[in-house]
């Protein structure tokens, strides 16, 4: 309607052009307002225009008899409708007088007249209390009223929605969106006010620079809290911005220990850390596999390097020797040079710190070079997607997740069904974590009895919530008090639970 209003204003400012046809003048218009030379088709179209505008005018006059009621007969609507009617009437007469050009003009006028009529019907469709029947117009007005009466509260979400791991970012967003939709359907009241949650979803592209810009945007959008970011390398620099604004940042998947060790009171996560995940992988390598010589590769991100470092500490403490330590990029696709060097030192196992977009090709190329050492990876590679990227070589991969398997989660099966029914795609990894994160934020809002970010933040330390992923309570740093690491191998390209390590 804003476009229509601008167009209408533009037309109503035009001065009427003089009638060039000397055979016709305003005095020769017939009783219906049409020129004697007007064709039957033009008369019929113009008649429809007049009927619509007259009907719209009657609606507006009826609305004016009613005392102004917010959301229905607001004075702004009267003013707007008056401009619409004035323009339409001008067009009707002007159209009847002109021979050409009229085709595009009447199409546009006719379309806008219909839109204006519908708009005024909506504005004046007040359903009286106690009115008999439940007509469509009344029901629509009631729905509009309910939505407009509610206070909009934004919850931010930040994850990569473009790039190599966009599928993981969308998975995270879907989990949060599912929770928001459920909460809105159930109805939420805070401090006596009806609340309508709105997910403010942003794409951080898994890039630290973009992530800080996104963080500032979410702050400027006045979100009550933020679910994100997906990557530790983005969560860590963004956390300073949220801290300065006293806005909760609760990550569903940032596992680098440094994220919650910066001294900020705003950083939380609903996932175990690499300080737990790294040792779990290292213990599996040294004890279950009996590996003595291990090569370590990371993608030079805060997540990949952090996980590799934690793995290395425990592996060396267990008596293993790190025979190679290499770094690549999270954008790399060709690992043959690094793998050739690693092959020459004959490791028993290879630890890869990175995401599935790189872990899949890494595993596939290792097999192509004849490397038989078992490859280990963290939660970033622990997806069904890595099976597609690695092909049959994925059978040589063991990975970990910083949490329980979906099949082992409380209400995991129910969540999986709801998720797939809503989004028509399988859960990747952390959708249940973002789902619970949204509920944790709302739980804090209820306990604070406030929608103000600082008050919600103050309620977070006392969180005691049972969600899909299990019991959620935080220590003084914002980490989970209870956690678990699940180890997987792959069968027929799909993840299969290998072991669960309670932390």
Image (tube, grey):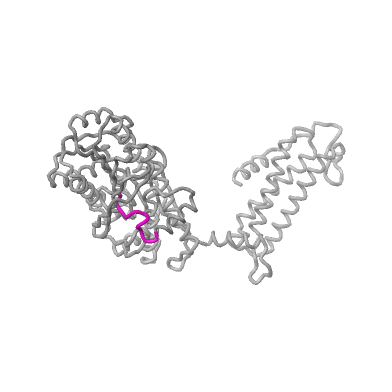
Query: Where is 214 relative to 178, above or below?
Result: above
In the shown orientation, is residue 376 left or right of residue 53? left
Q: Residue at x 34, y 62 (%)?
A: 455
Quadrant containing the C terminus is bottom left
Which image quadrant for residue 467?
Answer: bottom left
Which image quadrant for residue 58?
Answer: bottom right
Report how many numbered discs are placed on residues in the image.
Answer: 0
379 in magenta: no
Locate residue 144, reporting x and y percent: 58, 59
Report the front residue among 314 and 500: 500
Report the front residue among 95 and 469: 469
Query: Where is 218 relative to 502, above or below?
Result: above
Report the front residue among 106 and 392: 392
Locate residue 218, reporting x and y percent: 39, 49
Magenta span: helix, strand or loop, mainly? Answer: loop
Looking at the image, the residue that sits furthest to the bottom is 130
Q: Which stretch appears magenta?
A: 401-411
Report the front residue among 411 and 208: 411
In the shown orientation, is residue 75 left or right of residue 231? right
In the shown orientation, is residue 379 left or right of residue 279? right
Instruction: Say if residue 434 shows up in the picture.
Output: yes
Locate residue 475, reporting x and y percent: 25, 60
Instruction: Say if residue 239 shows up in the picture.
Output: no
């Amino acid at each position: 309607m804003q476009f229509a209003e601008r167009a209408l204003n533009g037309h109503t400012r035009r001065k009427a052009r003089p009638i060039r046809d000397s055979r016709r003048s305003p005095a020769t218009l017939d009783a219906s307002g049409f020129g004697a030379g007007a064709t039957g088709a033009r008369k019929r179209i113009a008649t429809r225009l007049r009927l619509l505008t007259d009907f719209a005018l009657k609606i507006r006059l009826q609305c004016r008899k009613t005392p102004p009621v917010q959301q229905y007969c607001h004075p702004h609507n009267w003013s707007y409708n008056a401009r619409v009617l004035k323009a339409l009437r001008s067009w009707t007469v002007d159209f009847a007088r002109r021979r050409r050009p009229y085709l595009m003009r009447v199409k546009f006028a006719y379309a806008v007249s219909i839109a204006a009529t519908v708009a005024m019907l909506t504005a004046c469709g007040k359903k009286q209390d106690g009115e008999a029947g439940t007509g469509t117009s009344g029901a629509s007005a009631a729905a509009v009223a309910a939505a407009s009466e509610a206070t909009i509260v934004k919850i931010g979400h930040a994850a990569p929605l473009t790039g190599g791991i966009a599928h993981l970012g969308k998975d995270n967003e879907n989990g949060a969106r599912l929770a928001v939709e459920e909460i809105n359907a159930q109805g939420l009241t805070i401090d006596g006010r009806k609340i309508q949650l709105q997910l403010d979803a942003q794409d951080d592209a898994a890039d630290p620079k973009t992530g800080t810009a996104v963080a500032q945007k979410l702050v400027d959008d006045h979100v009550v809290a933020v679910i994100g970011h997906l990557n530790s390398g983005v969560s860590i620099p963004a956390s300073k911005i949220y801290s300065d604004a006293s806005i909760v940042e609760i990550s569903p998947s940032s596992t680098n220990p440094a994220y919650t060790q910066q001294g900020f009171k705003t950083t939380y996560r609903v996932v175990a850390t690499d300080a737990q995940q790294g040792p779990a992988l290292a213990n599996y390598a040294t004890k279950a596999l009996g590996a003595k010589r291990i090569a370590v590769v990371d993608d030079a991100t805060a997540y990949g390097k952090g996980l590799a470092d934690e793995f290395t500490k425990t592996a060396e403490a267990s008596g293993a020797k790190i025979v190679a330590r290499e770094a690549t990029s999270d954008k790399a696709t060709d690992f043959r040079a690094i793998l050739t060097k690693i092959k020459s030192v004959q490791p028993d196992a290879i630890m890869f710190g990175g995401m599935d977009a790189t872990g899949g090709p890494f595993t596939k190329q290792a097999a192509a070079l004849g490397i038989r050492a078992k490859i280990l990876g963290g939660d970033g590679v622990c997806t069904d997607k890595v099976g597609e990227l690695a092909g049959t070589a994925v059978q040589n991969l063991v990975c970990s997740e910083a949490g329980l398997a979906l099949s082992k989660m409380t209400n995991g099966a129910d969540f999986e069904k709801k998720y797939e029914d809503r989004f028509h795609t399988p859960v990747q990894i952390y959708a249940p974590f973002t789902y619970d994160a949204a509920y944790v934020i709302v739980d804090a809002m209820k306990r604070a009895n406030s929608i103000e970010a600082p008050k919600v933040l103050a309620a977070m330390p006392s969180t005691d919530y049972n969600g899909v992923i299990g019991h959620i309570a935080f220590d003084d740093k914002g980490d989970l008090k209870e956690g678990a690491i699940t180890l997987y191998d792959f069968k027929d390209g799909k993840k299969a639970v290998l072991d669960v390590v309670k932390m």
